[in-house]
Amino acid sequence: MMCVMDSAAPRRARSAEAKQERERAILAAARTLGGERSVREVTLTDIAAAVGMHKSAMLRYFETREQIFLALTAEGWRDWATAVGEWSADRTVATPEAVAAMLARTLVARPFFCDLLAQAPMNLERNVSLDVAYRFKMAVFAEVASVATVLRERLGLAEAEAVDVIATATGMAGALWQMAAPGTSLRELYESRPELAHAVIDVEPRLTRILTALLVGYQAGAVR
């Protein structure tokens, strides 16, 4: 857990540099708290306490709790797109199976991002101003374009096909992560009752199978 700052009320950040430092502290606190529990369970009060601020003071930096987590979602997209690009740079040949495995592996290696991928369209995007939503979407579109370039260059996919693969990979990663319920009493229930064995989801192999089928299908279509 992050250490709470001393009880003396922190001074309001006055310079641009001080404001950015305060924003980074807020994001770091939310990132830590969100990684420890589900994003939906972290409140603005929790984040404020972690950085030693009053909740009302937080609103000078972020308009809502959802804006904080949208910023972290955009950060997650940048990190994931970078990982995909690095994987591609290390290879001369790629197959649909290898690309599917890489996409699944790099997503599952980022559990906090998977959680955010599910939360963003359900509630994060719906509780911010239109300007914030616009800037978030533009940031995400830039990373989608980066990953799409890798898929097009490595597998010869059309632009729309590449975007479909990314949407499937990220959408399913978010949904399957929620269904898997890692680290929760629900997961313990699924694993302890044989009749609920079908509910025990191993995200990476299932996501790999889904993406492999999609990529192989696209390549077969291109051959015809």
Image (cartoon, rainbow, N blue to C red):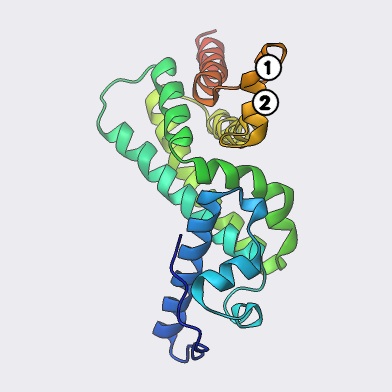
Residue ID for mark 1: 193
Which residue is at 60% across, 66% downward?
46
Return the residue found at the far front.
192
For the residue pair 98 and 113, the one nearer the viewer reads as: 113
Residue beneath disc 2: 189
In space, the residues marked 2 and 1 are separated at their CA atoms by 6 Å
Q: Position of residue 192 (x, y in %)?
A: 64, 19
In the displayed structure, does residue 189 sit left or right of residue 100? right
169 or 10, which lies in front?
10
Q: Do the CB atoms of the residues marked 2 and 1 lie less than 8 Å apart?
A: yes
Q: Is residue 18 above or below residue 51?
A: below
Q: From the top left corner, tell me how far across and down residue 165 is, in percent.
A: 56, 29
How crowded is the residue under tag 1: few (<14 C-alpha within 10 Å), some, or many (20+)?
A: few
| SS at circle 1 | loop
Side of 18 where 73 appears, left or right = right
Q: Counting other residues with Cα less than 10 Å from the Cα at mark 2, is it few (<14), some (14-19), or many (20 or more)?
A: some
Q: Residue at x 63, y 58 (%)?
A: 42
Q: Is residue 179 visible?
A: no
Q: Which amino acid does label 1 sit on?
A: Arg
- Nearer-the-camera pick, 213 or 161: 213
163 up-or-down from 39: above or below:
above
Tag on residue 24?
A: none
Q: What residue type is labelled 2?
A: Leu
Question: Residue 126: percent from the left, percent from the top?
Answer: 74, 57
